[in-house]
Image: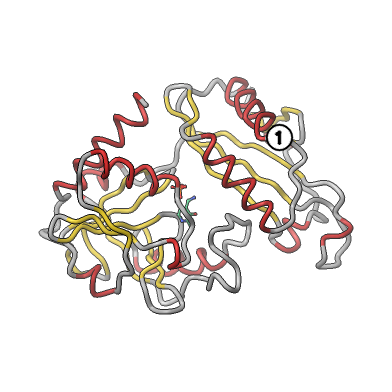
Amino acid sequence: MGNVVWMDGSLVPQEQAKVSVFDHAVLYGDGVFEGLRQYSGKVFRQREHLQRLFDSAKAIKLQIPYTPEQLAQAIEQTLAANKLQNSYIRLVVTRGVGTLEVGPTTCTRAGVFIITDKIQMYAPEMYATGMAIITASVVRTAPAALSPKIKSLNYLNNILAKLEAIDAGVGEAVMLNHLGYVCECTGDNIFIVRHGELLTPPEESGLLLGITRQVVLELAAKLAIPNRQANLMRTDLYTADECFLTGTGAEIIPVNAIDRRTIGDGTVGPITKQLMDAFHQCVNGR
Ligand code: PMP
């Protein structure tokens, strides 16, 4: 039997897991989602991911027709059915089926589905040697227009930046915000190290508050690595000693070049290595 998908309360073969063309998620990108990760049979930071999902839904006045506990059970059920121990989990809430009207008043019930799959990470050698990235010409959506804190199904801003990365032949693109400060990448948050200090853009720069970002800040505190959230300019990236990205799928991925400029000496730096080790211990041991 192939992979099964949890859809609105039942497990269905993936070929039958379909969303209506009248679902406003399809018509308008109206919905929210989460990406979670399972390590050795346990879902990592599940409570935080579900909290962010419910916050995203609340921010767009979308009622999720399940409790966080019910969704946690649904995740367990899907993982068990697919016999997974180490996997990536995609949890999506759509506005639901309605008329062609942009307003969601005719969408009476949100659709929920859960896909579990093998982990998609960057190529293993990139974790050893680092990955090249670019700064995108497209700026991050201004928080006053649509807050990137909402993990919504509107990913076009990110996709436009990702297309620039693909065109440049690199793995990620970092977006600046509407004020010119470094914000985040298309699916990852960004950190730099300079003179022994770990720096990452603050919440006010208009980023998604990444759960991996939070874990890294906690690990830095535990390891007594000086750390600070600070507005960064493109120049700060170019002159950094170390740089890495964080995300549920990527974990911690070192960056060795930005816009073809070598970061530090072009190898994975000591603080990045220390945090990568601590992160692996954290996800495996907790
Ligand atoms: N920023 C964006 C735009 C993302 O899509 C993601 C991935 N969810 C992240 C940052 C990293 O967040 P997390 O560590 O919670 O996966």
Question: Residue 109 location in percent, x, y?
Answer: 83, 46
In the picture, residue 137 is in which quadrant? bottom left
| Residue sitting nearer the eye, 148 or 173 | 148
Residue at the extreme bottom: 179
Left or right: 273 in relation to 37: left
Q: Few, some or many C-alpha atoms within 10 Å of disc 1 (few <14, some 14-19, many ≥20)?
A: few
Left or right: 92 in relation to 255: right
In the image, what residue occupies the spot 65% across and 35% down? 68
Q: Is residue 200 above or below residue 222?
A: below
Mark 1: amino acid: Thr
Coloration of the structure image: secondary structure
In the image, what residue occupies the spot 25% across and 59% down? 192
Question: Residue 28 location in percent, x, y?
Answer: 73, 63
In the picture, residue 102 is in which quadrant? bottom right
| Residue sitting nearer the eye, 33 or 168 | 33
Question: Residue 179 location in percent, x, y?
Answer: 42, 79
Residue under pointer 1: 67
Question: Residue 20 location in percent, x, y?
Answer: 80, 50
| Residue sitting nearer the eye, 20 or 206 | 206
| Residue sitting nearer the eye, 11 or 275 | 275
In the picture, residue 76 is in which quadrant? top right
